[in-house]
Image: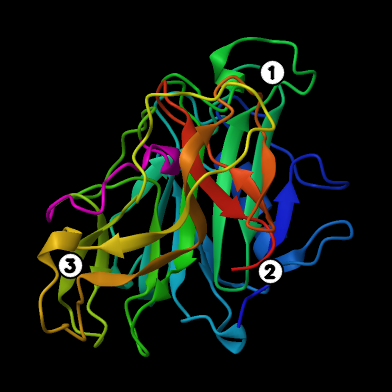
Amino acid sequence: MPTPVTVYRWDDEHAPQITERYGSAIEIKTILEACLVTGYGSKQALGWSKVFDDTNGVVFQNNMNSGGSGGMVKFWPKTGVWEGPFGSAGGMHFQAAKSFINSETAHHPGFFQTFYHPVTSSEVKAWVLIGTAKAFYLILSCVDESKSSSNSKYMMTSYHNYQGELFVGDFESELDSDAGKFIAFHSPTKSDETSIGWYTTLGYLHTSLSAGASDTGVKIYNADNSDAHVIYNPRVTFSKGSIHVTSEGANVFGIAPVPLMSDGSQNFPSVIDTTKPTLRGYMPGLVNVMRGLNRSSHWPQEKLIDGQKCFQLHSADSTCSHLWINMEQW
């Protein structure tokens, strides 16, 4: 049964704000608490729980009463400092786990990665969180609210200007029972990662359905709750095209979900492994379209796709974005 989605934005009434250059750990934490746990203004929270909160980090858990796995995610500052701007050498770490025993000890941890807000000046530091009781997407972006600037950092195609986009929560597993379905990442990796670059963002996902197995991706533990894990990659059905639609209002052609796969589609085994199948599941609410849109349009962009309102992710390079998040139901 589809789950309703809630959208939170920096320009909502009473929404918490980011004011520091690159953001700060306390500001990111405040936004997460407001969206996940407490709510703000007229917006109700998603129903997550805050499990731990101390100098080592803040840990949130998704809602098991609403069908969540009970998986947890930890956020903590790279430098250990919660107050003050991140700066270009700082940032916020985040890491998924089956559970956290305390704020420092994780059971079945994923790789941790790092992000910060891309705005380094006194300009508006926009953020959007789209989610449910089980999962969410967080987007941190440059925004030109007047839509008068032609600088690519304000556009849907950001031409190697970093934009923060990440996912946390349960993916939609192909298995009836899957102990490893809670994940958190912003880009494929093969180890814990402290670096931040234009390519460390969801909008740069580009691994094809036919690409072979890789040691770089998302660390997902076996469905039987064992300590073994496999590297999976979110994959796109439609590769980025060489023909770019620059204006708004163009039609969408081709719609596909984004699967999590450990090997290419041509390598599917004849017998499906029930603990680590090649096709593990799908990214919730993430839509891959054949025709990239809005190359020269200002962020943010929304569009009806298959009758559902969707929110467009940035394209990190010079091509058009082919990825959208469903804003209504997952």
Report the disc number at residue 46.
2
Residue on which the image places disc 3: 230
Tell me: residue 34, above or below residue 107.
Answer: above
User: Which amino acid type is shown beneath numbered disc 2?
Assistant: Leu
Q: Residues within 10 Å of mark 2 (few under 14, many from 20)?
A: many
Please, what is the three-letter code of the amino acid marked with disc 1? Ser
- Picture coordinates of residue 302 (x, y %)? 69, 42
Q: Quadrant of residue 231?
A: bottom left
Q: Residue at x 40, y 24 (%)?
A: 317
Residue ID for mark 1: 122
Whichever of callouts 3 and 1 sits on the residue coming sooner in the sequence is: 1
Task: Judge depth for marks 3 and 2 and give the one in front.
Answer: 3
In percent of width and height, residue 212 lies at 12, 53
**Among numbered discs 3 and 2, the one appearing first in the sequence:** 2
Q: Amino acid at mark 3?
A: Val
Q: Report the span colored magenta.
A: 200-214
Q: Nearer the viewer, residue 89 or 174?
A: 174
Residue at point 32%, 77% (across, down): 180
Distance CA(mark 2)–CA(mark 1): 30 Å
Q: State the separation of the CA atoms marked 3 and 1.
A: 43 Å
Q: Secondary structure at mark 3?
A: strand
Residue for point 60% across, 83% down: 1
Which of these two is toward me, 330 or 305?
Answer: 305
- Near mark 1 (Cα within 10 A), the count class, few <14, some 14-19 or many ≥20, is few
Residue 98, position in %: x, y? 36, 76
Separation of residues labelled 3 and 2 (CA atoms): 30 Å
Query: Residue 204 lies in what quarter of the image?
Result: top left
Q: Nearer the viewer, residue 158 or 256?
A: 256
Q: Position of residue 90 (x, y in %)?
A: 43, 32
Badge nearest the viewer, 2 or 1: 2
Residue depicted at 38% across the width and 31% down the height: 241
